[in-house]
Image (cartoon, rainbow, N blue to C red):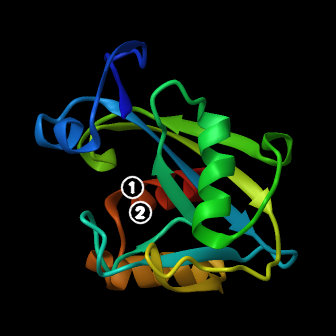
Amino acid sequence: MFDVVDERDAVIGQASRSEVHAKIFLHRAVHVLVFDGAGRIFSQKRSLQKDSHPGKWCSSCSGHVDAGESYGSAAVRELAEEIGVSVSHCSLQKLFKLSAGTQTDWEFVEVSKLSHSGPFDLNPQEITDGEFFEMSALRDDMAKNPDSYTTSFKTIINILSDC
């Protein structure tokens, strides 16, 4: 179950994942960007079994915020579930928040940063591949192959480029 939110990200109800997506209700998600000591970003390639954006490159980890869960708790949970990294929410640095819209699949997205060089234990039901990229190489590849990346991830990287 997910919290359904209004245009100010205030909870107005709950609904199942399938209902939220079918009826295009506003809801919440997290993206965590993991950087190693050399400043490279870890990107994951989504499993082909995913119902949205299968086989596309995305943030280090991402996922929905469950009903009643905070953004920080969801980020910690997703890190453990997707890439096998156990941290406290205090280890995360909040970067920014995206408003819900077409570029985020109608999700309010809180974006956080984590410094971690691995190793990672990739969940094969979530991820088919993952690797560290230099930011410049990632931006270049996004420009050349935009359809290889999720819309949210491209939006996040564009914002980081502007900072």
Q: Disc 1 designates what residue?
A: 152
Quadrant location, the N terminus: top left
Mark-to-mark CA distance, 2 and 1: 5 Å
| Residue 134 location, quadrant | bottom right
Q: Secondary structure at mark 1?
A: helix
Which residue is painted at 30% across and 48% down in the image? 103
| Neighbourhood count class around disc 2 (C-alpha, 10 Å): few under 14, some 14–19, many 20 upward | many
- The kind of residue tagged 1 is Ser
- Examine the rendered structure and indicate whether residue 27 appears above or below residue 146: above
Which residue is painted at 63% across and 47% down in the image? 75
Q: Disc 2 designates what residue?
A: 154
Residue 163 in picture, x, y percent from top left: 64, 49
Residue 109 in picture, x, y percent from top left: 47, 40
| Left or right of residue 40, residue 15 in this image | left
| Residues at circles 2 and 1 in contact by the CB criterion of under 8 Å | yes
Which residue is painted at 59% across and 55% down in the image? 78
User: Number of marks in the image?
Assistant: 2
Q: Secondary structure at mark 2?
A: helix
| Residue 27 location, quadrant | top left
Residue 21 in picture, x, y percent from top left: 20, 43
- The kind of residue tagged 2 is Lys
